[in-house]
Amino acid sequence: MTTATTLKVRYFAWVREKIGRAEEDVSVPAHVATIADLVEWLKARGPEYAAAFERGEVIRAAVDQSHAPRSARLVGVREVAFFPPVTGG
Amino acid sequence: MTTATTLKVRYFAWVREKIGRAEEDVSVPAHVATIADLVEWLKARGPEYAAAFERGEVIRAAVDQSHAPRSARLVGVREVAFFPPVTGG
Amino acid sequence: MAVRVQAEDFDIGAEVKALAGDTDIGAIVTFTGTVRGTAHGEVITRLSLEHYPGMTEAELARVEAEARARWPLKASLIVHRTGELAPGDNIVLVVAASAHRHAAFEAAAFLMDYLKTRAPFWKKETGHSGPGHWVDARDGDTAALARWEADPRP
Amino acid sequence: MAVRVQAEDFDIGAEVKALAGDTDIGAIVTFTGTVRGTAHGEVITRLSLEHYPGMTEAELARVEAEARARWPLKASLIVHRTGELAPGDNIVLVVAASAHRHAAFEAAAFLMDYLKTRAPFWKKETGHSGPGHWVDARDGDTAALARWEADPRP
């Protein structure tokens, strides 16, 4: 038996442009436990996701608005974001 | 036979206060060839000079408005200045 | 002691004046980043700045708190613009004020180095033709962090 | 590209604005030195700045030329006040503008380090009583030069 988790996922800069949306609410199955799992799960959703995450190792992630490694767990998380390395300043 | 040289000598900050004047024109004998010679010659002029140059090694010098070491020669020089280490900025 | 993310321009003189007044301050360093007119030899006509509302302010506040933990700052400020900018426009202002100059210089440089690698902003440059392109992160920006990591309490 | 010695106050924002306009500039660093209200635990009511007219401008110009030889600066400025100042007043402004931030930061720090040990200014602090005393040169200011001497072309 699996429990689905609902997450808000946000995309920025060229990740946003490739996926074609800025944010969405997704229900992920319980085996999607980490950011790394979420990336794999998103890539299977469609060609735009696969294209966005093609060079997935350069894409950074944040969990509830804090930088997070791929190993970060999704338990209790409300918002995940994916974006290129930042270029402000 | 000695030739006298006329120099403008300027004093700043506590050197000026101890000597009691900001500048003066002096005629120095030809054996006063360097800044070091000039310091010795000035110290012999009176107690206010001796007091000002008592810690003579901390006093800096400039020749024609450029920093100069004690060994700098006075030939062709028009202006010599003595002052404490600078404290601007 | 403040971070702001805004579309509007800022006035360096007014921002510094607002921080001053504390007579323990003896040294104020400001850094202003501006939009250059060329990149890789190409003329730039527009710079778009995207950001992550909420996380941006939180990251800037963390960067500022880290600087204040490392140096005895009397005042600090980060202002970063977003939206559509043109060459010559201001992008970012960082101010660090301290009793002495070395702390102010180091803290301002630290704020910029950290901001550049942590705060979620993304620049897109547009020239005379084409759809524009996202600016690549510079390896130098990551390398610039090394000196602060190696010497966490200067 | 300019040095000024003046009794009047300066306006940081206006000075930076006057330097800007060159779209090769991407980074502007300013340093402002101000009069602190205390020294060695004593309250200061007045700071008098004496200088050596002529030599001061010449030394500041040499310091600026040296910075421009070391870093690719698009603009630079040194403004130093003289005369009678009060706590909180501006003393000195240094501005360095370059394409990138590291050159601007380093050049501004260099300008201050050199100015502090070479430009003929002398500060006298006066408190509530007594005739005032001349500020001693700080060993740290001479030590600060070492990093530029050791690495003459960063």
Image: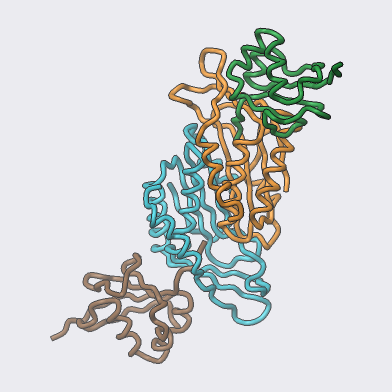
Chain colours: A brown, B green, C cyan, D orange
Residue at x 72%, y 20% (from the top left corner): B38
Check the image and report above or below for A53 versus B22: below
Looking at the image, which is closer to me, A24 or B27?
A: B27
Residue C14 location (% of width, % of height): 58, 45
Residue D62 location (% of width, % of height): 71, 43
Looking at the image, which is closer to me, C20 or B17?
A: B17
Report whether C145 appears left or right of A39.
right
Check the image and report above or below for B8 versus D2: above
- Which quarter of the figure has residue B65? top right
Residue D4 location (% of width, % of height): 72, 38
Residue reaching furthest to the front? B1
- Which quarter of the figure has residue C16? top right
Residue at x 56%, y 35% (from the top left corner): D34
Residue D56 location (% of width, % of height): 71, 34
Image quarter of the C terminus of chain D: bottom right
Report whether B49 appears left or right of C5.
right
Looking at the image, which is closer to me, C8 or C63?
A: C63
Residue at x 70%, y 38% (from the top left corner): D59
- Which quarter of the figure has residue B31? top right
Check the image and report above or below for D8 versus C47: above
Check the image and report above or below for B50 versus B33: above
Residue reaching furthest to the bottom? A47
